[in-house]
Amino acid sequence: MGLGSDVSLDDLIRREEAVFVARMGKTAELWQRAQRSMPGGVCSSWASSRPLPVWVSHGEGAYVWDADGTRYADMHGGYGVNAVGHANPAVVRAVQDRVARGTHFAQPTEDAIHVAEALAQRFGLPQWRFGNSGTEMTMDAFHLMRAITGRKLVVKIEGTYHGHHDSAMVSIFRSAAQLGPLHEPHRVPGPGVVQEMADLLRIVPFNDLPALERVLEQHRGQIAGMIVEPMMMNAGIIPPQPGYLEGVRQMTRDYGVLLAFDEVKTGLVVDWGGATRLFGVTPDIVCLAKALGGGLPCGAIGGTEEVMSAITDGRYDQIGTFNGNPLTMAAARATLAEVLTPDVYERAEALGERMLAGSIAALATHGQPSYGKVHGFKGSVVFHDRPARNYREFLAISTAVSHLHFLVQFNNGVFLPPWGKSESWTLSVAHGEVDADQYVANVARLGELVAGLGDRLSTLFATGSFN
């Protein structure tokens, strides 16, 4: 049913937040208790969300249960990790077998060889090392590029997130006011990062080859490398425009600059060989994490023979006590060999396309514009009238409608990442049409709710935030 003219988007959000809180008594208790011993009452700042952080009890297959016992179709996926689903039998068997034979030696086990060989086949890069998170892997990429070239500067895409180390936590904007001029974007350090680290980066917009060429020419002989998500994943999903990645690859070669793909979010979810295989452009370095470990902490960095020789000959020490941890390697081997096999991606993408088409149609019925993208297990619906090509354009889209969408989905049995505007859904091998149709039904509920706002909703496309 439509709404009267006296109802605002804020009113809708408050209503859904009230429904959320009313169902979450045990969660509220846990959160209050946790705040006495854990900053913000959560394990990671990204777990904080309005009105309450979601505390999870357990998961099985495509579903998770919150601390209050409510079941949800899990399309949060642990921020893109759980493409295998929860308690996947192959991963459970592998971990149970390994845990009974020892969980840590700080020495390699045979499973690591199988994982490295599988990644070499999938991504077309011959040599691999392991770590424990995406942050560690992109940090290694920065270090490798600088160690190999002896240069300091690295090119980064405006607005992209590459982990929370000092080299990468720059130009992660919350508002357009921070961006600076398009021809020379501001190098804004993140909290706790000094300006001197930010000044070692050069920022360019995504999908803008002329901007990249200007920077490479201006700093010829000074740039060690470029790091890029082959498709932007913290802005819904922004794919590369035709020829963009090919142009980046050619330019970096022409200027003697190493190229690293951050595939922490895309690798093993958008395609069985990641965006590297999907788009047919091979970089010098690939960084992986998230889905690789089947739910365990993981990371991997792959490179050409030339790049990885810097580790072999000691120009760079890629080290870590838990690198190649036996539990992680066992889970990753099972994930690659038994679960995320090439055949499952087509089914996941068909399911995602069903969700996207149904959602766009449902919103259109209520006069609401939207767009989206689907690749493998990943997909997104963005509440705007035209696709963003870069982060600047994406910042113009309201976060308020996205938050309302998160609340409507959660209150009706689908768990999405709480930062709904920027994060995409992650399906798993366990999801089916029932789950996809539930998502679409909830989008239709959202469309019905906001239909009463009429022309007032269009003004929100320029707000970029809510209170």
Image (cartoon, rainbow, N blue to C red):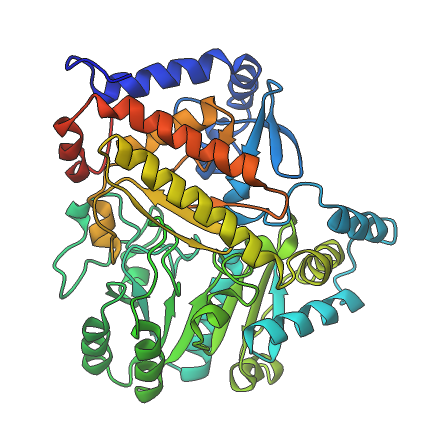
Query: Dividing the image into 4 quarters, which one contains the N terminus?
Result: top left
Number of numbered discs:
0
Vertical relation: 111 (above or below) 353? below
- Residue 391 x, y percent position in the rendering: 26, 54
- Residue 182 x, y percent position in the rendering: 14, 61
Query: Dividing the image into 4 quarters, which one contains the C terminus?
Result: top left
- Depth check: give the residue in front, 151 or 345: 345
- Depth check: give the residue in front, 205 or 361: 361
- Depth check: give the residue in front, 230 or 99: 230
- Residue 309 x, y percent position in the rendering: 57, 84
Please indicate, yes or no, whether residue 202 appears anywhere in the rendered image.
yes
Residue at (28%, 42%) from the top-left corner? 370
- Depth check: give the residue in front, 394 or 297: 394
- Residue 186 x, y percent position in the rendering: 19, 58
Residue at (18%, 53%) from the top-left corner? 179
Residue at (54%, 51%) from the top-left corner? 348
Image quadrant assignment for residue 222? bottom left
Please indicate, yes or no, whether residue 132 appears anywhere in the rendered image.
no
In the rendered view, does 455 fall on the left or right side of 165? left
Residue at (62%, 82%) from the top-left corner? 312
